[in-house]
């Protein structure tokens, strides 16, 4: 007892082997999104830049697009034509009910009203397909002004737009990554591949910071490649508090 020797009774227990493997925090590829203008135009303002955090709906850049001005004009014309067609229809309906005009004139007015309604709906859908509210067409602003907004919250990881540039509708001008979840890319050596499985729980610890967390193995690469001849296991981590930063070694 004075030597520190203790005696205990052996009992059944479950032995849980633990592997310590190196890895790195990377972006969740499923939450990376490229922003395209969706219509051509001239850049008149760039509001956000590389590395900045943005919220959904924030203005990233503003362009002037003749295409948008044309679509908004078509919408305004269709709106006025519908109002005129509705007035004509109501007048012809009253005259027909009073037996002043023929039914054919009333039916013609009804058809013109229906066609004007369809034309307005089509003009509205064209704007909505480009992410533009039809109501902005008669807000008093420049008809060609187009505000490019962030579709998701996250960090701007790439920017390819400058003031005064003429951009095309399909050019990727921003890349935004939602970092509310991140991945830990863990290196798995060939001798450990039969141990690491999808669905297992993994404890992740940063090597240079006092940051720890737990996640689930969601994917293990089937091919062994690269200079290390190792596979990669992907562990998904919750990152709503922003503790995990892509590039951290774990």
Image (cartoon, grey):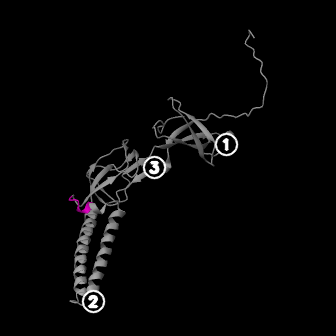
User: Up-down: is 74 above or below 206?
Assistant: below
Tell me where residue 10 sits by quadrant. top right
Q: Earlier in the sequence, mark 1 or mark 2?
A: 2
- Secondary structure at numbered mark 2: helix
Residue 179 image label: none
Q: Would you name the residue on which mark 3 appears?
A: 32
- Secondary structure at numbered mark 3: strand
Q: Residue furthest front?
A: 98
The residues tagged by marks 1 and 2 sit, at their Cα atoms, a distance apart of: 81 Å
Q: Quadrant of the N terminus?
A: top right
- Are the residues tagged 1 and 2 within 8 Å (C-beta)? no
Q: Earlier in the sequence, mark 1 or mark 3?
A: 3
Tell me where residue 129 appears, x and y as whole percent: 36, 63
User: Up-down: is 240 above or below 148?
Assistant: above
Is 129 in the magenta? no
Residue sitting at 36 percent across and 52 percent down? 173
Tell me where residue 21 appears, x and y as whole percent: 61, 35
- Are the residues tagged 1 and 3 within 8 Å (C-beta)? no
- Classify residue 89 as left or right of residue 122: left
The residues tagged by marks 1 and 3 sit, at their Cα atoms, a distance apart of: 29 Å
Q: Which residues are magenta?
A: 136-140
Closer to the camera: disc 1 or disc 2? 2
Q: Would you name the residue on which mark 2 appears?
A: 104
């Amino acid at each position: 007892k004075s030597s520190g020797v203790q005696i205990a009774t052996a009992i059944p227990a479950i032995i849980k082997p633990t592997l310590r493997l190196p890895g790195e925090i990377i972006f969740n590829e499923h939450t990376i999104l490229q922003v395209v203008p969706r219509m051509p135009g001239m850049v008149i303002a760039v509001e956000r830049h590389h590395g900045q955090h943005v919220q959904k709906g924030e203005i990233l850049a503003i362009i002037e697009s003749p295409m948008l001005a044309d679509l908004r004009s078509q919408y305004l014309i269709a709106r006025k034509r519908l109002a005129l067609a509705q007035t004509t229809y109501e007048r012809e309906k009253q005259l027909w009910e009073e037996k002043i005009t023929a039914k054919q004139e009333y039916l013609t007015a009804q058809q013109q009203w229906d066609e004007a309604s369809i034309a307005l709906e089509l003009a509205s859908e064209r704007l909505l397909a480009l992410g533009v509210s039809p109501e902005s067409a008669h807000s008093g602003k420049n008809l060609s002004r187009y505000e490019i907004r962030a579709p998701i919250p996250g960090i701007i990881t790439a920017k390819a737009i400058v003031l005064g540039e003429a951009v095309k509708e399909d050019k990727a001008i921003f890349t935004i990554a939602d970092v509310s979840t991140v991945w830990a890319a863990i290196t798995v050596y060939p001798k450990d591949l039969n141990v690491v499985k999808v669905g297992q729980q993994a404890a992740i610890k940063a090597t240079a910071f006092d940051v720890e967390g737990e996640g689930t193995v969601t994917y293990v690469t089937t091919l062994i490649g690269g200079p290390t001849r190792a596979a990669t296991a992907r562990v998904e981590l919750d990152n709503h508090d922003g503790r995990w930063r892509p590039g951290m070694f774990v």
